[in-house]
Image: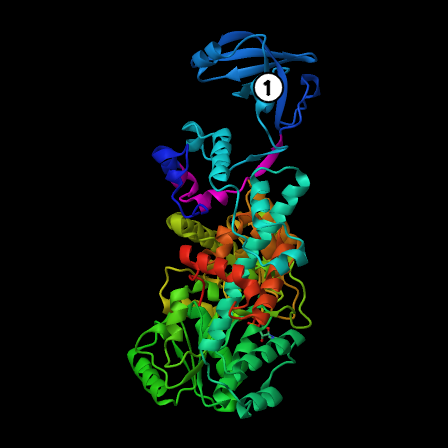
Amino acid sequence: MSVNLQTPIDYLKGVGPNRADLLRKELGIHTYQDLVNLFPNRYIDRTQYYKINQLQRNNVDIQVIGKLIKFEEIAQKRGKRLVASFQDETGTMELVWFRGQKWIRESLKLNTPYVIFGKTNWYNGKFSMAHPEIELKEEHEQHLRSAMQAIYPSTEKLTNKGITNRVMTKIMQQLFIETKGKFTETLPEYLRSELKLISKSEATFNIHFPKHQELLSKAQFRLKFEELFYIQLQLILKNLIHKSKIKGFPFLIVGNYFNSFFKEHLPFKLTNAQKRVLKEIRHDLGSNAQMNRLLQGDVGSGKTIVALMSMLIALDNGFQACLMAPTEILSVQHYNGLYELCKELKISIKLLTGSSNTSERREIHKTLENGELQILIGTHALLEDKVKFKNLGLAIIDEQHRFGVAQRSKLWKKNTSPPHILVMTATPIPRTLAMSVYGDLDISIIDELPAGRKTIKTVHRYDSNRLKVFRFIRDEISKGRQIYIVYPLIQESEKMDYKDLMDGYASIERDFPKPEYQISIVHGKMKAADKDFEMQRFIKGETQIMVATTVIEVGVNVPNASVMIIESAERFGLSQLHQLRGRVGRGAEQSYCILMTSHKLSNDSRTRLETMVRTSDGFEIAEVDLRLRGPGDIMGTQQSGVLNLKIADIIKDNDILQLARHHAKQLLKADPTLAALENKSVLHTYRQMSKYKNIWNYIS
Ligand code: ADP
Ligand code: MG
């Protein structure tokens, strides 16, 4: 019988309760399986030995054969260090110990061949190695060692408690002894032969004990493929199950509302991307399955009109529709815009937010339930229990990253049968990541901006250039333009940020005095009504400058605003900077974005600023963001498997991801229930995964 990989790690010979505890706490290793999946960070070549005169000042791990010539104790500030001269036929270097000196002196022999291993330092004109791994040459030669030695992830605590890489390697060897190195195959034979993938057992062995570079590469490829393949399989399967189980309302016709809007009231020509996306949505709405679609489009790409036209299809089929936005400002703006667009269509459309008064609410609740109200726009207020639709056919969520999963599913439950869902986001996440994170949603992308948009000129300026920047603002205002000045407001340090904002406001008031200049201010601490008042003054052109925190980040549309100044730009993340910049460049005028910073910039800040100056492509920016931050911080990834990737790298292994997705799709197309004999291993693996991992907490 083979060893059960779910066996607790305590049972592995040589581990015991103390080490098991450490492994659990430090590396999350609970079972044999977890240990198998502790993949090395890197490998070092232990067949190669360096001569001392070959050493380079590059601080890498190397090994050297030589003899200890003499020990010396050197006093230092606190305590002393033990230094040994280590010699081979080409030269001398120093070995240094700061701890355990007594034991070292007593156990190491002079003038006897040793093999030392570690990182070299160049210090005081000499090479030295601190706390080397050291082993008698004779013993060293008795070990069977693979060419490449795995270096495992570790922590300070593990090292301090004596679980060095060497110990880790021994534990791993023991695992292979107990399991006899036999691991259940997880990929079907036909797939392995088509893709020339080595077996699970061979890959597992070679990832830990690579025989040579080529086998290591094959092992890595096979295991990365496997990992991505199963994530994709789960996501696609979930999507399929969803489609077959959850019936939507088929919107069979495209009728009067849609057609007359399209023919008579559309204020511009749709871009090809908008047309394509509308077609995709129409197709979903017309099918029997419930739509669950993510619409991605860069800021200003024109998602709102797509939302409206989708809602008109719902109305054409006798259903209601709603549009939920994350902020009051944005909801109001959507409402005003859509109200204007639909005026001629005689549609009943209402706005519901936290500041709607009781009688407005009552009216909305009533007409919503009796079906008179056709389109409802609003904030979270839409989620309240009192909000009951007669027949909600389509729910649209704008800027979805502001809403949690729970909130979304609440909307979903507003009907006996779930409405079609369209989620819109302007925070582009790289396509590859979208595929892993939202693999269970269908994705539409508007990858084209309306014609005639001028690229926003983006520059980076230091605070010391403020006078010039202010002069520029004055010029723009004299041409009739409007200006945004945005301050960071980050929750933890809210008080300080608030002070920055107010100081900034005061100084702008000094430089742009009334009555010549009028200034609006909007921040999170203001009452909704005051915010709206200030916002409206700016929208109407009564004020030329809008001083704000990031509350204006999403969605605000003032085409006459042509300059976006971002204060302390180094403190903003890339996607936020991109969002903010998207507030300008909406009209016919040349627009500008000025990123103000102090002189003190970290490398990451510099990269962010350079990226903003270089490109305005939201997807490219998202890629850089992903590289800088890793997937962990990107919206939406928290719920997904990408965070827990053990061996694949979501950025570097993009090709493998595509390949894995392709094959997962094909497999499910041919065998949707995984019933075929040839897919037995897939079914088995899939069941194991569902059993031991909570893989179902993806978005639904
Ligand atoms: P976002 O995708 O950021 O939500 P919006 O829907 O707010 O973008 O559209 C941005 C601006 O572009 C709006 O003023 C809108 O009227 C305009 N717009 C949208 N589609 C087109 C188009 N096809 N041609 C010209 N202007 C368009
Ligand atoms: Mg929008």
In the rendered image, residue 335, in percent from the top left (x then y), is placed at 46, 78
Q: Residue at x 47, y 66 (%)?
A: 400
Q: Residues within 10 Å of mark 1 (few under 14, many from 20)?
A: many
Image quarter in which the C terminus is found: bottom left
Q: Residue at x 54, y 90 (%)?
A: 253
In the rendered image, residue 45, in percent from the top left (x then y), is placed at 64, 31
Tell me the element at label 1: strand
Examine the rendered structure and indicate whether residue 320 appears above or below residue 77: below
- Whether residue 367 appears in magenta in the rendering, the answer is no
Q: With 215 as the anchor, is 373 left or right in this view?
A: left
Q: Residue at x 35, y 65 (%)?
A: 527
In the rendered image, residue 264, in percent from the top left (x then y), is placed at 60, 89
User: How many marks overall?
Assistant: 1
Colour style of the rendered protein structure: rainbow
Residue 24 position by quadrant: top left
Tag 1: amino acid: Val
In the rendered image, residue 477, in percent from the top left (x then y), is placed at 59, 63
Q: With 344 as the anchor, is 267 left or right in this view?
A: right
Q: With 274 as the anchor, is 30 left or right in this view?
A: left
Q: Nearer the viewer, residue 99 or 359?
A: 99
Q: Nearer the viewer, residue 535 or 224?
A: 224
Examine the rendered structure and indicate whether residue 446 appears above or below residue 132: below
Examine the rendered structure and indicate whether residue 21 appears above or below residue 119: below
> Looking at the image, can residue 264 be seen?
yes
Residue underneath mark 1: 115
Q: Nearer the viewer, residue 89 or 682?
A: 682
> Looking at the image, can residue 427 be seen?
no
- The magenta-colored residue range is 23-45
**Furthest-bottom residue in view?**
256
- Whether residue 24 appears in magenta in the rendering, the answer is yes
